[in-house]
Image (tube, rainbow, N blue to C red):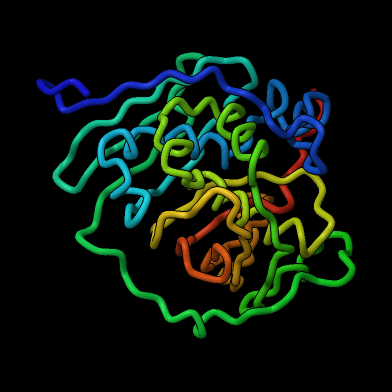
């Protein structure tokens, strides 16, 4: 932290954790068909890079009740340096991430006086679909409740995740805490666990943390589809959800993704 300017800086060598994933937007060849230079570093990992700054500023308090919003405007590519800056505002931090001289992501973070209360029963518990079908305009019908297949990152998996996102803050292993970057990953699972997607893109997330998760928590989500629409040839889906750790709320998330992006015409 620069005390004179009220700013923070952080550098990350970006890493594409999803080169071999089902989502081929992270594959170099496929991504080029959609107008990109190569496979995209997942937005959830870019958001995890951004979380370093508010955790550096507020520590465990942020993990227990912090609010962060991230929007991805340009791709971040594997092996490129991501430069993050956080500037203090009256309400918290304004965060920018640049790479290759371009603004790639913007966001804000703040520390409310207390975490808001959510009634768990207001979020319907359903299982993920028994059999996934290829994505269509009706896969995520507005108003529909969606669930996830439970997942945890325990033991070596927790350490590998921290290494993958290049996290250097010792608070997670020292205090046995789960990194909040895992929670948007669970939001992605809401989409993946309920349809067979082609290449797709995470656009942004607003996340209010409600409690600090622990390493090894079983993570699930109770999500409602709040938007399903076409914009500029892309199919967008918006989700409102509680992400749970061992059945207790860890975060409230608003998650936006392009589930069917427009393919670029060959030059």
**Residue 107, image quadrant:** top left
**Residue 34, image quadrant:** top right
**Residue 201, image quadrant:** top right
Q: Is residue 127 above or below residue 4?
A: below
Would residue 166 be found to the left or right of residue 31 on screen? left
Residue 17 at x, y = what percent?
69, 31
Residue pictured at 45% horizontal, 64% vertical:
252
Would residue 247 be found to the left or right of residue 118 on screen? right
Nearest the eye: 163 or 232: 163
Would residue 74 be found to the left or right of residue 20 on screen? left
Q: Residue furthest left?
A: 4
Residue 232 at x, y = what percent?
62, 50
Nearest the eye: 87 or 181: 181
Residue 133 at x, y = what percent?
88, 64
Residue pictured at 24% horizontal, 57% vertical:
112
Residue pictured at 61% horizontal, 55% vertical:
231
Q: Is residue 149 above or below residue 69?
A: below
Q: In this view, does 113 lie above or below 70?
A: below
Would residue 195 be found to the left or right of residue 72 on screen? right
Q: Work out which quarter of the rendered image holds the C terminus and state it.
A: top right
Residue 108 at x, y = what percent?
33, 44
């Amino acid at each position: 932290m620069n005390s004179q300017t009220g700013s923070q800086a952080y550098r990350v060598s970006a890493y594409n954790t999803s080169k071999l994933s089902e989502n081929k937007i992270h594959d170099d060849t496929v991504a080029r068909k959609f107008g990109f230079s190569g496979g995209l570093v997942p937005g959830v990992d870019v958001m995890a890079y951004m979380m370093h700054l508010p955790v550096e500023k507020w520590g465990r308090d942020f993990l227990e009740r912090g609010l962060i919003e991230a929007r991805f405007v340009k791709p971040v590519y594997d092996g490129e340096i991501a430069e993050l800056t956080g500037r203090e505002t009256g309400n918290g931090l304004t965060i920018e991430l640049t790479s290759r001289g371009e603004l790639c992501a913007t966001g804000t973070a703040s520390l409310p006086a207390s975490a808001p209360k959510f009634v768990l029963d207001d979020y319907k518990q359903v299982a993920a679909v028994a059999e996934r079908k290829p994505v269509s305009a009706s896969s995520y019908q507005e108003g529909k409740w969606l669930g996830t297949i439970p997942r945890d990152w325990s033991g070596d998996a927790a350490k590998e995740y921290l290494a993958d996102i290049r996290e250097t803050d010792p608070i997670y292993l020292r205090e046995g805490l789960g990194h909040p970057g895992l929670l948007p990953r669970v939001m992605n699972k809401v989409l993946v666990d309920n349809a067979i997607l082609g290449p797709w893109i995470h656009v942004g997330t607003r996340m209010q943390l409600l409690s600090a998760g622990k390493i090894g928590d079983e993570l699930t989500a109770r999500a409602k589809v709040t938007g399903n629409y076409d914009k500029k040839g892309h199919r967008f889906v918006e989700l409102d959800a509680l992400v749970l750790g061992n059945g207790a709320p860890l975060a409230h998330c608003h998650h936006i993704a392009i589930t069917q992006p427009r393919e670029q015409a060959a030059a």
